Image: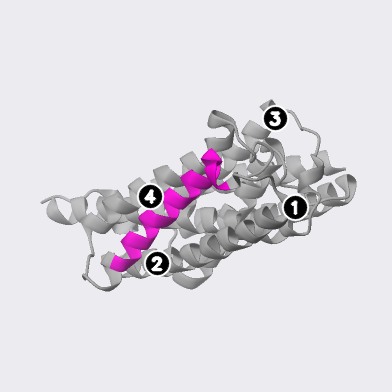
Amino acid sequence: MSGILFTAAFGFYAVGLFHSAAGFLTWRNLFFKVAFISVLIGFGFHTVFLVAKGIELSFYPPTGMKLSLAFFAWTVVLCFLIAYFRYRIQALGLFLLPLVAAMMLSTVFVKESAIPDILRSSWVYIHSTCMFLAYGMFFVTFIASVLYLLQVRELKSKKPKTFFYELPSLVVLDDLFFKFLTAGFTFMTAGMLFGVVWAEQQWVTGWYRDPKVIAAGTTWVIYLILIYLRASAGWRGKRVAWMSLCGFVSVLFTYLGARLLGGQHIFLQ
């Protein structure tokens, strides 16, 4: 049953991605409408899949690389839907959905792993959810930064290309960027705090030397500096966009760090 739900979600996401691309090539709003409806239906199947998988395992899904990829994709789609309802930026789908499709497809090549006893704790529900929501929101800020840089380049050119007319204004992109940046930072802060409490109570000593903990702390500092410069020093535009790109590279390293460097988080997100 869960396999059918997963396939249905992936299929609707693929349809959404195809129609998003078609919308940019033809300038027809009908394609964008079909894309959005397809993503919305796919998100519904995706949600039911995660619930069904949790019931099947009698535990929270994102405890291994296979299910964490599926859950990461779910949070990215959730953030996309929130951003779309708020800003109606049609370009987001064309940039966000390829990552969603890639993460969903990559789960086929990853084997499910047994759930270690240390993860059978109520703390994992809060810690993992907060961290994944932060990752999804930081990805939106990453895409907003990319779109911002593209828009700046088009504005400086004497002959803007077709893509220029499909992009939102710099003001809208800056607002999208800052709101998702602060929200993502808040969720990451909460996730790390819950993780610290959990580690102090149930994990082995020396957990703070875990490679993923160090990577998460580095990522948190990068975004803290970015928020500080954006709020107090008035940093805007290209400097903020480029720093955001660096921040998301750190997010990806934090997410994959356990697999690359080992440590206590080998079964976590």
Is 214 contained in the magenta span? yes
Q: CA distance from mark 1 to mark 3?
A: 17 Å
Within the image, what quadrant is residue 260 found in?
Answer: top right
Read off the magenta span.
208-228
Out of 245 and 256, give the one closest to the viewer. 256
Say which label, 2 or 1, has the lower sequence index. 1
Does residue 85 appear left or right of residue 57 in this picture? left
Is 163 contained in the magenta span? no
- In what quadrant of the picture does the C terminus appear? top right
Amino acid type for the residue under numbered disc 2: Leu
Q: Of all residues shown, which one is farthest toward the front?
A: 205
The disc at residue 108 is 3
Say which label, 2 or 4, has the lower sequence index. 2
User: Mark 4: few, some, or many residues within 10 Å (few <14, many ≥20)?
Assistant: many
Closest to the camera, between mark 4 and mark 3, is 4
Q: Which residue is mark 4?
A: 247
Out of 123 and 7, give the one closest to the viewer. 123
Residue at the spot 77% in from the left edge and 45% down from the top edge: 118
Say which label, 4 or 1, has the lower sequence index. 1
- In what quadrant of the picture does the N terminus appear? top right
The disc at residue 45 is 1
Q: Is residue 269 above or below residue 173?
A: above
Q: CA distance from mark 3 to mark 2?
A: 33 Å
Amino acid type for the residue under numbered disc 4: Gly
Amino acid type for the residue under numbered disc 1: Phe
Percent across and percent down for residue 180 are 45, 65
Say which label, 3 or 2, has the lower sequence index. 3
User: Mark 3: few, some, or many residues within 10 Å (few <14, many ≥20)?
Assistant: few
Percent across and percent down for residue 101 are 58, 40
